[in-house]
Structure formats: structure tokens, C-alpha cells
Image (cartoon, rainbow, N blue to C red):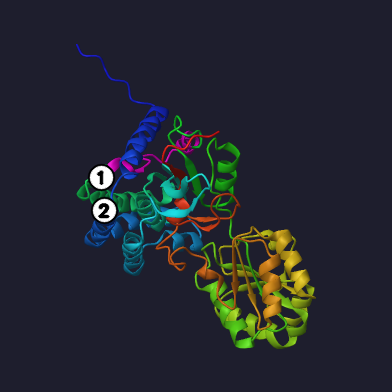
């Protein structure tokens, strides 16, 4: 009588995923540029071919989310449409055609003793991506990691599980056709939260970097528990400052787009700061435009005295990433006060200044310490695709290694190559 095989534990399952990822990383780091390009173009074609399957999978996720009573902003992040799938396909194609960063010589120089030294880009290895709700992250992260020569372990939120599975299947089609191991891209096959804990432990040394992409609680957990390096993607507590020199039309149009184009993304504006000298000319037109689009206004005492629709802003409002059609508004006495407010409350993600005075712009750019700074344009350009990266694995708000949109170059490290002709150190 044969022995009954024990069901593997979650730790064993995750350990196997880690070991397989290391095998995938070993193959990807020596893959040719053409192999990686083929894998991604094939994956883009598969996404298009399986569009109906992907949309059906997404509808399963959407139905479950609606049943839970999930917020409108969350549903917007989760939703896939034909237009959004077109965007995913375009992003994967763009990433496919980017220059291959692996092996690129970043710098080179000669020493007096004749040694020639090169600093060369090399993959990081295995990247663990932990994200919530956005299915497009599955494709972006997978494609960016393939292009940069890294294996990736994807742990999406339970809310987007079916959508992510359908997209990963397309990436695997591409890897298979290009002759690369399908273990290069793996989706954690369970929604059990303990799987996150196993990834944060490093899967026996097989994860080199963790990228969290989600809300405050997820990022806080990752930063608290991770035993491997983390590219922190903190909340997007984004500010728009209307300077005394701001053009009115630009101020209205940019603020409206920065807040209302998509309220649930991390580049959406959450706080508006208006210089006191333009309160009479600029505040009401900006607020009128926001209210007309359904935005709730929470203001300081001066804003409340001028805007009948405004609710009182509390201390908590200045600290809140609403991810909804709500904005907090404050009148400031000077650009210095605006910068001080941003320094105190910002998550150091993205900030914008609307101004015609170039000295004010330079002051803002020099003194505000956030990953992305914008002049006279919407904060919703804080996106790897808009930077020309094809996509992003997240926006890093820390200061080590990667900062801002994390694209293919940011997913590489470097090594030094020394070329000599028998030199000996005396």
C-alpha cells in the first residue's frame, strides 16, 4: 500500500517558488537582447489574442469587489477595459523596444598603470513585487523584469487574482516561445497573507529586492518585516502650489487634471496650496472647476470664508491621501510657507508648482525634497510610461539606489570590469 503524500506547507510552496526564480534569473541574466525582445512582443500579442479571457477574469474580480462594497476609487484601479488593455499592450511593446540595459558600460577610464576600468550594468537577480488591486502592475512588472534580466515573483492582491493570472499566462507564452524558462515570471498561487511574510523573509536567500506597491499598511508591513532590501513605494500625498506669478488658465487646467483625471492613482493631487496674493483672482475659478467635476473641498479658515461649499479641513486632512474626489486647500503667505508645509506633510512622492516666475520655480525645485517635481504640468505625469520607461514597477520615494519611477535601468545594479596586461600591485 503506497504512502499518502503529505500536502506541502505554504512555506515549502514558497521555498520552491524562490528556488525556481533563482533558476530563472540565471537564465535571464545571460539571455540575448533579441530573446527578451521576442518574449515581450509575443506576450503583447498574447494579451491581445486573449483579450476576452482577460476581461472575463477581470469581471470575476470586479463582481467580488462590488459584493464586498469596495469604494469607487478602488474599483477604478481594479477595472480593466478594452482601452486599458490597449494601454497594457502598448506598454509591453514599448518596453520590448527599449535599449537592453544589461551589459551597458556606464563609465570607463584608464589608470596610470595601464588598467582599463569599466562600470557595467548587471541585473539585480530575483525581484519580489507585492502589490494591491491594479492588474496592470502584473504586466508592467513582469515585462520590466524580463527586459532588465531579472526573474520576478508577483504577489498581487486577492482582489485582482484572476486578472493577474490571465495576464501572467500571456507573459509565460512569450517566455516559452523565446526559449526562456517560464520560472522567470511566477505568480504566487495563493491569496494567503502568510505568503507575503514568506517573501519578506527572502525565501531562503533567493529574493534580492522587494518592491511593495500599495497602501500605507502594506508598505509599513514590508518596511517593518523585510529581511531583504526594499524599494519603498510610499503613498502619494501630492501637493500643487499656485504661486503668486501663476497664469490663471494654467492654474485651473493643471489643478483640475492633477486632481480629477483619475483620483485613485498615486500621482493624483491631494492638497492645493494657494499664495495669498492670488486668492482673489485664482482661488474661486480653480475651486469652481473642481466642484463642477464633483470634487469635495476641505479648506482652512480663509478658504471657508470665500468658498461656501468648503468643509473645514482638520489636521488629519493635511496628512491624508484621499484617492477620491476630495482635496484639501490652504492659503499660504509665501513660497517659503508652501515649501515648509510640503516638507512637513509630504510623502516625498510628487509636488507641482504653477508659476511664471522662474526664480520661484528654481527655489521650489532646489528646496522641495520629493522624488518628482513638476512645473506648470499635471502631477499625473508621475508615471514611468509618461517618462518614456514603457511602464514602472513602482515609484520609489526613498533615496537609496532607485528614486522616482522604477524602470529597466533602475532594476539593474553594476559591476566593475578591470582589463589589464600583467599589471602587479607593488
Q: Residue furthest top?
A: 1
Q: Quadrant of residue 101?
A: bottom left
Rendered location of residue 287, percent (x, y) = 64, 80
Q: Which mark is residue 35?
A: none
Residue 393 appears in the rendering: no
Whole-number angstrom distance, CA of label 2 to CA of label 1: 8 Å
Tag 2: Cα neighbours inside 10 Å, few (<14), some, or many (≥20)?
many
Rendered location of residue 371, percent (x, y) = 59, 60
Count of labels in the image: 2
Rendered location of residue 370, percent (x, y) = 63, 61
Rendered location of residue 93, percent (x, y) = 31, 63
Q: Which residue is mark 2?
A: 39
Q: Which residues are magenta?
A: 182-199
In this rendering, position of residue 188 left or right of residue 119 = left
Tag 1: Cα neighbours inside 10 Å, few (<14), some, or many (≥20)?
some
46 or 330: nearer the viewer? 46
Quarter holding the C terminus is: top right
37 or 163: nearer the viewer? 37
In this rendering, position of residue 212 left or right of residue 143 = right
Quarter holding the N terminus is: top left
Residue 192 sits inside the magenta stretch: yes
Name the residue rendered at 21%, 61% in the picture.
49
Name the residue rendered at 54%, 65% in the picture.
267
Assess whether mark 1 and mark 2 are in contact (beta carbons under 8 angstroms).
Answer: yes
286 or 182: nearer the viewer? 182
Name the residue rendered at 56%, 56% in the picture.
403
Q: Which residue is mark 1?
A: 180
Amino acid at each position: 500500500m503506497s504512502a499518502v503524500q503529505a500536502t506541502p506547507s505554504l512555506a515549502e510552496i514558497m521555498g520552491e517558488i524562490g528556488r525556481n526564480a533563482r533558476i530563472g534569473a540565471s537564465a535571464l541574466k545571460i539571455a540575448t537582447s533579441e530573446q527578451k525582445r521576442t518574449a515581450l512582443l509575443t506576450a503583447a500579442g498574447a494579451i491581445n489574442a486573449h483579450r476576452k479571457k482577460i476581461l472575463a477574469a477581470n469581471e470575476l474580480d470586479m463582481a467580488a469587489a462590488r459584493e464586498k462594497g469596495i469604494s469607487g476609487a478602488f474599483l477604478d484601479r481594479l477595472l480593466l477595459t478594452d482601452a486599458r488593455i490597449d494601454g497594457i499592450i502598448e506598454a509591453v511593446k514599448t518596453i520590448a523596444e527599449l535599449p537592453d540595459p544589461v551589459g551597458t558600460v556606464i563609465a570607463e577610464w584608464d589608470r596610470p598603470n595601464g588598467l582599463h576600468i569599466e562600470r557595467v550594468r548587471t541585473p539585480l537577480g530575483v525581484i519580489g513585487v507585492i502589490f494591491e488591486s491594479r492588474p496592470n502592475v502584473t504586466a508592467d512588472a513582469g515585462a520590466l523584469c524580463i527586459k532588465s534580466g531579472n526573474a520576478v515573483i508577483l504577489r498581487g492582491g486577492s482582489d485582482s487574482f484572476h486578472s493577474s493570472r490571465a495576464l501572467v499566462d500571456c507573459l509565460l507564452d512569450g517566455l516559452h516561445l523565446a526559449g526562456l524558462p517560464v520560472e522567470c515570471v511566477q505568480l504566487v498561487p495563493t491569496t494567503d497573507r502568510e505568503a507575503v511574510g514568506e517573501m519578506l523573509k527572502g525565501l531562503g536567500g533567493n529574493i534580492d529586492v522587494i518592491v511593495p506597491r500599495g497602501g500605507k499598511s502594506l508598505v509599513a508591513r514590508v518596511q517593518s518585516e523585510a529581511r531583504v532590501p526594499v524599494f519603498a513605494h510610499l503613498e502619494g500625498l501630492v501637493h500643487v502650489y499656485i504661486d503668486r506669478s501663476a497664469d490663471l488658465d494654467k492654474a485651473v487646467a493643471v489643478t483640475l487634471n492633477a486632481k480629477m483625471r483619475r483620483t485613485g492613482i498615486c500621482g493624483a493631487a491631494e492638497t492645493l496650496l494657494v499664495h495669498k496674493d492670488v486668492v482673489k483672482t485664482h482661488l474661486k475659478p480653480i475651486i469652481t472647476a473642481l466642484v463642477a467635476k464633483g470634487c469635495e473641498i476641505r479648506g482652512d479658515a480663509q478658504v471657508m470664508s470665500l468658498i461656501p461649499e468648503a468643509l473645514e479641513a482638520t489636521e488629519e486632512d493635511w496628512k491624508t491621501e484621499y484617492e477620491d474626489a476630495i482635496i484639501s486647500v490652504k492659503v499660504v503667505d509665501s513660497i517659503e510657507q508652501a515649501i515648509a508645509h510640503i516638507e512637513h506633510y509630504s510623502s516625498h512622492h510628487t509636488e507641482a508648482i504653477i508659476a511664471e516666475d522662474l526664480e520661484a520655480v528654481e527655489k521650489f525645485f532646489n528646496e522641495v525634497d520629493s522624488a518628482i517635481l513638476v512645473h506648470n504640468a499635471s502631477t499625473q505625469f508621475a508615471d514611468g510610461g509618461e517618462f518614456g520607461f514603457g511602464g514602472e514597477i513602482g515609484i520609489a520615494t526613498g533615496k537609496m539606489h532607485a528614486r522616482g519611477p522604477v524602470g529597466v535601468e533602475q532594476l539593474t545594479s553594476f559591476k566593475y570590469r578591470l582589463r589589464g596586461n600583467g599589471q602587479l600591485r607593488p
